[in-house]
Image: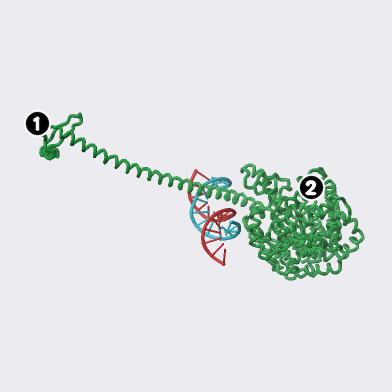
Chain colours: A green, B red, C cyan
Amino acid sequence: MGPTLYMDVDLIDILWRQDIDLGAGREVFDYCHRQKEHELQRQRVQEEEKRQQLLREQEKALLAQLQLDEETGEFVPRLAPSSQSPQSATTAASPQVTQNVSFTEDGDAMSFDECMQLLAETFPLVEATATASVCLDVTVAPAPNSNHVMACELPALTQPPLLPASQPPQRTSPDLEQAWMELLSLPELQQCLNMQMKDTLDQTGGYLPTNTTPEVQDPNYSFYTLPNLAEVASNAAEVCPPEFINAFEESFPNMAPLDHLNQMTLKAPDLNTNFSAATFCDVFYQDIVNTKVTSVTLPCGQGNGGNSLAEISHKPTFTPMELHDLSPREAFDRGNKTEIMPEFPDSDSGVSVEASPHASSPEKSMYGDGSFGGYSDSDMEEMDSNPESAESDYSEMFSLSFQPDGFQTSPSVSAQQQDKKPKHGKTEPDEETGHNDPPFTKDKKRRRSEKRLSRDEQRAKALQIPFTVDMIINLPVDDFNEMMSKHQLNEAQLALVRDIRRRGKNKVAAQNCRKRKMENIVELEYDLDSLKEEKERLQREKTKNYSSLRQMKQELNTLYLEVFSLVRDEEGKPYSPSEYSLQQTTDGTVFLVPRIKKMLFKKNDN
DNA sequence: GGAAATTGTCATACG
DNA sequence: CACGTATGACAATTT
């Protein structure tokens, strides 16, 4: 059982990651496990001792993460939506705020303060949504090694949630974006990010040795992360946008993913003992509660950070699709009974789990729904619509994350992203704040209008496909194949890419077809009008000609009578019109023909 | 809340 | 045969 359970845990991790990508709050799950074992003991001691130091770094990390979240917006929102409802959201908000505050206090730099404010403004929703996550975070935090994360979380715990929650979510997407960009561009911030990256790496390295990481994940992870790191180092602090993206990817992938993995592995064993499919949720929940109670001091800030990190990490880190493959999940699902669906049953399906988008109870939702919820295409959308805005964030995040991968983005894509960016901040706040259950329709509409990610984009994101949808669809066959050959994709990813390409092509074809159809209709209508006009014109001409003909006949008749009246016989008497008529031959000669004769002639002719 | 309009997909045929 | 396109039919969404 032990090994199998362990495996399950890893699989679960993977699945969770996927779920997270999808919008599910797997982080919660992972964290809970981790927390159970090591969090309380180690975290308390180490964290408390090193709090201050860690706080700085962690906060920095959080900032980085938060930023990522913002831009990508994916994960942060998700957590909230998946996990819960407004209440949770409010709670979550507080943690972030606290983090922000602590950060500023640390006095890293003036810029940081600004950043914090920005974060507070931009993430009100996220934070709110994160409430539920906070609990989770606490539980999660446990991993001793994950000091960074923990530290980050600690601030939040120690400091009561202040501003963010209270502050109404502001939708200053454009402004916020600019601000973010600026912040990112700040050398200090970048340095901090880099620092965190390194720290996380180091820490992760330390952790890994103990239990370590699922083989599968690590490879991929390293695969993606390494490049990023290198880039970061090289870039250090430079320009905002590019670096911004890179930094995020780098920082997050390294930090969150690794930590999670480590924690996961560590905790897995423990869980195994208790873990049963049925009890799975319960266990987590309990663990979380316990951890919270016992280790208030522990860094849990993760509500925000943790979630955000986890989410963020997903993107940046490319979890191996292979792992993804539902098998693990399915097993997991059976056990839990939670509704996790195979995300990619077909290439077509994006994801499937249906979590109840609207979590009923905050806590439970967190554990049950949030963690387990999967998303189908429709589900994905629902998530977005969910209280939180997962969707908006998601889409936004997605766009950002996508590019970061280092893949070229097609111009169109970039343009879309830009468009989306401004909205990110806004969307989240609105939803978070209030969160209306009904929002569903509203959110969807809003999203669409705002241009959220398409289904395929969401799917691609969920599977962490390293190409933009535009690239997948628009690249010529040769280039497409070349691109595909450069990246190792699992079957699910390949299938999805193929489907995306097929659907994308067909979508364009359908659009063209409809456009053509409409053009044809318009043309035909135009032709119809033209023909109607022609008909009327001809009708008028016909009438005119008819009248003209009558007139000519009239004139001809008059002339005929006039000529006939001038004709005289040998005696000088006029011929009777009734007995004679004038006939003209082809050569112009005119003959006076007796009507009787005429009749005779006719008879003869016949 | 429902009808009309859009839009996305799928299935299928064709080049 | 693989691909891409065209298009009717449906379904999901949006207006």
Q: Nearer the viewer, residue A459 or A587?
A: A587
**Amino acid under label 2?**
Glu
| Drawn side of residue C5 relative to residue A236, left or right | left
Q: Identify the residue under disc 2.
A: A182
Q: Residue at x 69, y 58 (%)?
A: A391
- Residues A213 and A435: in front is A435
Q: Is residue A506 above or below residue A129?
A: above
Q: Position of residue A115 (x, y in %)?
A: 81, 52
Q: Earlier in the sequence, mark 1 or mark 2?
A: 2
Mark 2 falls on what kind of element? helix
Give above or below for A406 relative to A131.
above
Chain letter of mark 2 equals A
Mark identifier at residue A201: none
Question: In the image, is residue A491 above or below residue A360?
Answer: above
Q: Quadrant of residue A267?
A: bottom right
Left or right: where does residue A60 sit relative to residue A518? right
Question: Which percent across, then down, holds residue B4?
Answer: 52, 58
